[in-house]
């Protein structure tokens, strides 16, 4: 009987195991499945906290609903009745001490029509006219490996990109646009430009794809995102789950692998899935031949601060769901989600719950990264008063510091990943790298990654030689 060990009990590792169990039953394969997790709980960055009628998330607050891998898993887990969608509303950009609405008919701040472009209060008339060159300028040199900033500024102009698009995309991908490629973020931008002659026209022609679910683009669950983690743990009846098991090494032993643990135990495996951050995978493998590629992968940091107030969220601007901050602002934060407005299930009495984000791409991060929780809350309260005019002491606070744990898809990412995969096939056959460090940061991407790896392992097992 073959043994598969998955190291890492986050959404990628759990999804891998879920689909391995499913395929094991479908193909009637005798398979020993083991999942190991260093913490005493599963979920990785996904963790919901409930306190005083508030629900807060330590990591992501939602899942992109239109991702092709999300709904099939939700249905397989019988969680449809637990789903909740985001409330629709206006997102703002905080610039020049003012909240400016991001124009309707935009995706990531990119206009989907000339009308949307000219409705913006963030961009000057001159900047809007410059952006019209997108309709008449052809792409002669750019590829998917071009940086987002170079590509977008070449056709839409510097002002529109800096004031309206960059704040949104930098927030989504936790990096500066000159460090991010289209291939690792929005590969269809190049396709739209080449096919339609215009980025704006490309979005306009494909509007239905982005608006098919109205503005309800994100999904969570009534009890928070931990719901999907808890259900996955419940249904993994064919898997041995080892929590609190700190893996120290993965070494080759003939045609198999030995996985060693901090308590000096070890297990043998035929297949290993490293569903953990790249630096952990590097430490476990201890291979000098792979270090160059592993060192190419970069992470950024993020501090998340929830503040729950004993006041109603009706004090917020009408129809708003949050704001993003432009560079060189008088605020310290990069973004603020009005959580109780955007996600009704997070506040039992519709009290005000906001979430502030402080990212390492912001120069102020170097000043605040070593602050105490009390000092961080003081910074957040200043930002709330400055931006929204709200004063008062919060009744609930939840601070999460993700230090060097946010994957950053820079210009060399894809090439390093391709080279690493090729080397892994030769040096470590049947070991799979998985998770947000490599194949996409969204929960949907992690689910898809786990499913693909499960399919690959089962396909290998079904080969005649096995």
Image (cartoon, rainbow, N blue to C red):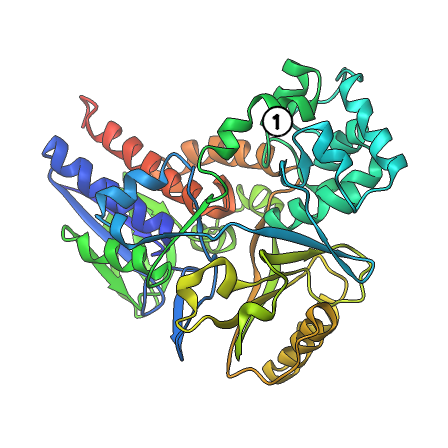
* In this picture, residue 219 sits left or right of residue 122: left
- Residue 102 x, y percent position in the rendering: 68, 46
Q: Residue at x 34, y 34 (%)?
A: 452
Q: Nearer the viewer, residue 434 or 351?
A: 351
- Residue 239 x, y percent position in the rendering: 18, 52
Q: Residue at x 41, y 32 (%)?
A: 425
Q: How many marks?
A: 1
- Residue 196 x, y percent position in the rendering: 65, 15
* In this picture, residue 112 sits left or right of residue 7: right
Residue 252 sits above or below residue 429 on the image: below
* In this picture, residue 264 sits left or right of residue 161: left
Residue 389 quadrant? bottom right
Q: Quadrant of the N terminus?
A: top left
Residue 162 sits above or below residue 96 on the image: above
- Residue 122 x, y percent position in the rendering: 79, 46
Q: Nearer the viewer, residue 355 or 241?
A: 355
Reading the image, the residue beneath label 1 is: 203
Q: Residue at x 74, y 29 (%)?
A: 151
* Crowding near the residue tagged with mark 1, few <14, some 14–19, many ≥20 C-alpha atoms within 10 Å: many
- Find numbered disc 1 in the image and state the secondary structure of the residue it sits on: helix
Residue 214 sits above or below residue 394 on the image: above
Q: Quadrant of the C terminus?
A: top left
């Amino acid at each position: 009987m073959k043994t598969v060990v998955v190291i890492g009990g986050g959404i990628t590792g759990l999804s891998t195991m879920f689909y391995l169990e499913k395929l094991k039953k479908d193909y009637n394969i005798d398979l020993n499945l083991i999942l190991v997790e260093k913490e005493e709980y599963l979920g990785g960055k996904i963790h919901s906290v409930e306190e005083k009628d508030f629900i807060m998330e330590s990591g992501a607050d939602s899942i992109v609903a239109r991702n092709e891998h999300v709904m099939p898993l939700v249905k397989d887990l019988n969680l449809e009745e637990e789903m909740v969608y985001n409330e629709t509303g206006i997102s703002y950009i905080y610039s020049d001490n003012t909240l400016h609405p991001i124009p309707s008919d935009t995706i990531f701040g990119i206009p989907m029509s000339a009308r949307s472009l000219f409705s913006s209060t963030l961009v000057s008339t001159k900047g809007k006219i410059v952006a019209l060159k997108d309709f008449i300028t052809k792409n002669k040199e750019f590829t998917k490996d071009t940086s987002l900033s170079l590509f977008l500024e070449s056709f839409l102009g510097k002002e529109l990109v800096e004031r309206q698009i960059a704040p949104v995309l930098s927030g989504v991908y936790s990096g500066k646009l000159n460090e991010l490629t289209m291939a690792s973020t929005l590969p269809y931008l190049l396709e739209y430009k080449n096919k339609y002659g215009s980025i704006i026209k490309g979005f306009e022609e494909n509007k239905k794809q982005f608006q098919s679910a109205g503005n309800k683009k994100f999904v969570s669950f009534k009890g928070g995102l931990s719901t999907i983690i808890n259900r996955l743990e419940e249904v993994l009846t064919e898997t041995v789950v080892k929590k609190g098991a700190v893996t120290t090494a993965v070494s080759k032993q003939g045609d198999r692998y030995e996985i060693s643990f901090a308590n000096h135990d070890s297990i043998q495996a035929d297949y290993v899935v490293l569903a953990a951050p790249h630096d952990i995978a590097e430490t476990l493998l201890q291979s000098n031949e792979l270090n160059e590629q592993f060192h190419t992968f970069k992470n950024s940091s993020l501090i998340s601060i929830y503040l729950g107030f004993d006041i109603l969220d009706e004090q917020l601007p009408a129809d708003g769901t949050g704001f993003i901050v432009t560079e060189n602002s008088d605020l310290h934060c990069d973004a603020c989600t009005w959580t109780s407005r955007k996600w009704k299930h997070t506040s039992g009495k519709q009290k005000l719950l906001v979430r502030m984000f402080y990212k390492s791409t912001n120069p102020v991060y170097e000043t605040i990264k070593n602050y105490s929780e009390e000092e961080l809350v003081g910074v957040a309260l200043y930002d709330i008063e400055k931006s929204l005019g709200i004063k008062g002491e919060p009744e609930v606070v939840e601070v999460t510091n993700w230090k060097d744990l946010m994957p950053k898809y820079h210009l060399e990412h894809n090439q390093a990943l391709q080279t690493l995969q090729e080397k892994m096939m030769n040096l470590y056959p049947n070991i799979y790298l998985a998770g947000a460090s490599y194949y996409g940061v969204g929960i949907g991407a992690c689910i898809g990654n786990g499913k693909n790896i499960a399919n690959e392992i089962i396909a290998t097992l079904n080969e005649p030689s096995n």
